[in-house]
Amino acid sequence: MADGEGEWSYSKNSRRPEIYFRETKPVVENAIKEVYTTLLPKTMIIGDLACAAGPNTLLFMSSVISTIVEHCKSSRDDSVELQFFLNDLPGNDFNELFRLIEKFRRPNITGERAHLPPFYYIQGLPESYYNRLFPRESVHIFHSSYGLHWRSQELEGLESWRKTYLNEDNIYITKTTTPFVVKQFQKLFYKDFSLFLKLRHEELVHGGQMVLIFNGRKDEDVYNGDLNKLFALVAIALKSLVLKVVVYVNYCIVVFLLIFISRCEGRHEVKKF
Ligand SMILES: C[S@@+](CC[C@H](N)C(=O)[O-])C[C@H]1O[C@@H](n2cnc3c(N)ncnc32)[C@H](O)[C@@H]1O
């Protein structure tokens, strides 16, 4: 992700994840409400995984706080306290993120409501979520938006295949992507996602919930779908830039965006009982 707060930074260019967040906000709020009202924790531990360094993390925290304000009827002294852990890879621009948080803290975001917001604490957690991040059974809510399509590693053996350009000039699945390549990425997706679920399961308290927002595909046929067409066009545009030497001459496209591996329809609820 591009650092800082400049024109091309992630912070200024995260509109698509913002749309996803706004669309799924009721699911997040419902999870917060259910966990809070059933478990009544004194301290609610909340992990935002793959938070990046942009305003969407603040939208998430703001919606958690507002939901608690709405459902917490007790006085501030004995009401729940919130602890947010903001996780991303160590290379993420946590400085920019905490600069944004400073601005977020200043205005009273819930000022017009009858109840005061709960006390909340915010920590950065720079570490891959393909490792254990929290002590066992300690987290009440996991949230992760638009991050789980990132793979844990390059495909093994990619270096030696590079000579033959693993996915030719494509950046996604097109007609010229071989079934072998698709299979390799599918296998990696299943391995990564299973590990992610296993680790989070260990870290969630009983009755905790996870809200994971990421793209899926509706069509069983991986060669078919809107994004196949879209990224095929993007690849053609990139290639034409390369040919026009706008992009450095030796640049070769080895990026492979395999976002939609698993078939998925609608919404699936995962709770830990
Ligand atoms: C598109 S951004 C999502 C940002 C944010 N959740 C939002 O809604 O704006 C994806 C983020 O996932 C992070 N990421 C990728 N792999 C990760 C991993 N293994 N562990 C933690 N974060 C990861 C990237 O560093 C990147 O910041």
Image: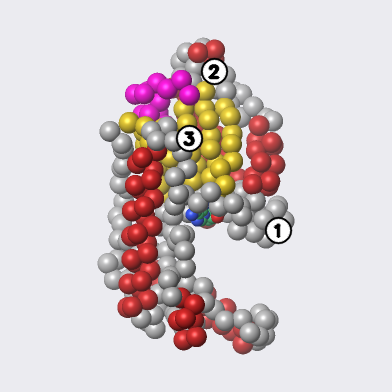
Residue 151 percent location from the top left of the image: 45, 61
Amino acid type of the residue that numbered disc 1 sits on in the rendered structure: Glu
Disc assigned to residue 168? none
Q: Residue at x 36, y 23 (%)?
A: 39
Residue 46 percent location from the top left of the image: 48, 35
Q: Residue at x 47, y 64 (%)?
A: 153
Q: Is residue 13 visible?
A: no
Q: CA distance from mark 3 to mark 2?
A: 21 Å
- Residue linked to disc 1: 7
Residue 188 percent location from the top left of the image: 37, 64
Whether ligand 1 has any atom under 8 Å from the Cβ at mark 3 is answered as no
Q: Residue at x 47, y 72 (%)?
A: 256
- Residue linked to disc 3: 46
Q: Is residue 98 left or right of residue 218?
A: right
Q: Residue at x 38, y 45 (%)?
A: 199
Amino acid type of the residue that numbered disc 3 sits on in the rendered structure: Ile
**Mark 3 Cα within 10 Å, few/some/many (few <14, many 20+)?**
many
- Residue linked to disc 2: 115
Where disc 3 sits, the SS reads: strand
For residue 122, which quarter of the picture? Answer: top right
Residue 24 percent location from the top left of the image: 42, 44
- The reply to whether the C-beta atoms of the residues labelled 2 and 1 are less than 8 Å apart is no
* Residue 233 lies in the magenta stretch: no
**Which one is earlier in the sequence, the residue at label 1 or at label 3?**
1
Q: Nearer the viewer, residue 51 or 190?
A: 190
Magenta residues, start to end: 28-43
Where disc 2 sits, the SS reads: loop
Q: Nearer the viewer, residue 257 or 201?
A: 201
For residue 31, which quarter of the picture? Answer: top left
| Quarter of the rendering occupied by the C terminus | top left
**Mark 1 Cα within 10 Å, few/some/many (few <14, many 20+)?**
few
Q: CA distance from mark 2 to mark 1?
A: 38 Å
